[in-house]
Image (spheres, helix red, strand yellow):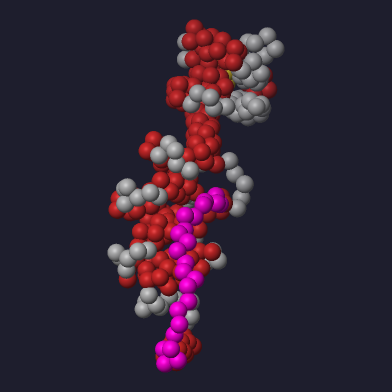
Amino acid sequence: MTQASNPRASRRSDGHSHRSPLHLAFTLASILLISGCSWFGDDEDVPIADSGEQQIYFDAQEHLENQNFDLAIRTLQLLESRYPFGRYAEQAQLELIYAHFGAYEYEAAIEAADRFIRLHPQHPSVDYAFYMKGLAAYDLEPDFFAKFVPTDDTKRDVSHIKEAFAEFAQLLARFPDSPYAPDARQRMVHMRNMIARHEIHVANYYFRRGAYMAALNRGRWVVEHMQQTPSVADGLAIMAQGYFLLGLDDLALDSVAVLRENFPDHPTLDQDGNFDTVYDLDGLEQSWVNKISLGLFDPPEPPQFNYRPQR
């Protein structure tokens, strides 16, 4: 899980005041009464609604520092409901975003960030809300087991990655000097690479299905819109392959020339720089074994463009 900085306010007061014996006795009796009541409760850590605004806020800080995010959420929600216009109300709304994120409640974190942005568009820390929206959107993952089993994320749905990219883009557009901007830029580079790689996987799927125009369009989109990503090399190869299959040889040769100029080590190019393919105009080339067995043995496999240029 991505670690995010937490803008928790340090508003603790360490001052002490002189208290009379009567006052101390009353305070002690109150503490004993509250403690006695907790013996009969189910959860002694549940915040007490009448503890006072400052004490509830300090309790929330302690829960956050201990990474007890469930209790932090309940405490912050209590603080906001009891003191909606108090001195800690805005900070509680801001820290609730972080608490939901820490509890893996990414949709709730996005909702809390949206609410903060809507209520406090001019707040000095509103850039943090945009940043956390991006982090939470990126971590949205419908497949629970994907968090524990190593898989290629670019082969799954990347809609949440596109959403996160849009959130970070909005952060940079509105707050280019934000302290969260450098991290957002780095994440956007990574996400662009992932989105481009996803398009290559989709193009490979279309080739397997015989949908050559659809595959070509995916490769062309990567070349036109995802410049400076490693997937551009495969995008050019996909364009060349698609054009050859569609009988558009001139366009295919143009794509091969650009591929040869920029990525001479691409596996679709032979030693002389010619485009090497297992396709012909009738589809996949068949070996003689496959032909005489009527397709039962040695079936041809469509190429899977998966070039990763060395950096």
Query: Quick one: which residue is furthest to the top in this view?
Result: 250
* Left or right, 115 with reference to 213: left
Q: Residue at x 43, y 89 (%)?
A: 20
Q: Position of residue 169 (x, y in %)?
A: 42, 37
Name the image quarter holding the C terminus. Answer: top right
**Residue 268: quarter of image:** top right
Position of residue 242 measured from the top left corner of the image (x, y, whole percent) = 50, 18
- In front: 117, or 203? 117
What residue sits 49% from the left and 15% below the top? 243
Q: Is residue 108 above or below residue 311?
A: below
Q: Residue 85, located in which quarter of the rendered image?
A: bottom left
Q: Quadrant of residue 81?
A: bottom left
Residue situated furthest right in the rendering = 271
Q: Position of residue 110 (x, y in %)?
A: 40, 52
Whether the magenta-drawn stretch holds residue 194 is answered as: no
Where residue 196 sits: x, y (%)?
51, 31
- Residue 157 in sight in this render: no
Residue 307 visible at all: yes
Viewer-proximal residue among 221 and 129: 129
Which range of residues does the magenta coloring cover? Answer: 1-23
| Horizontal side, residue 83 vs residue 186: left or right | left
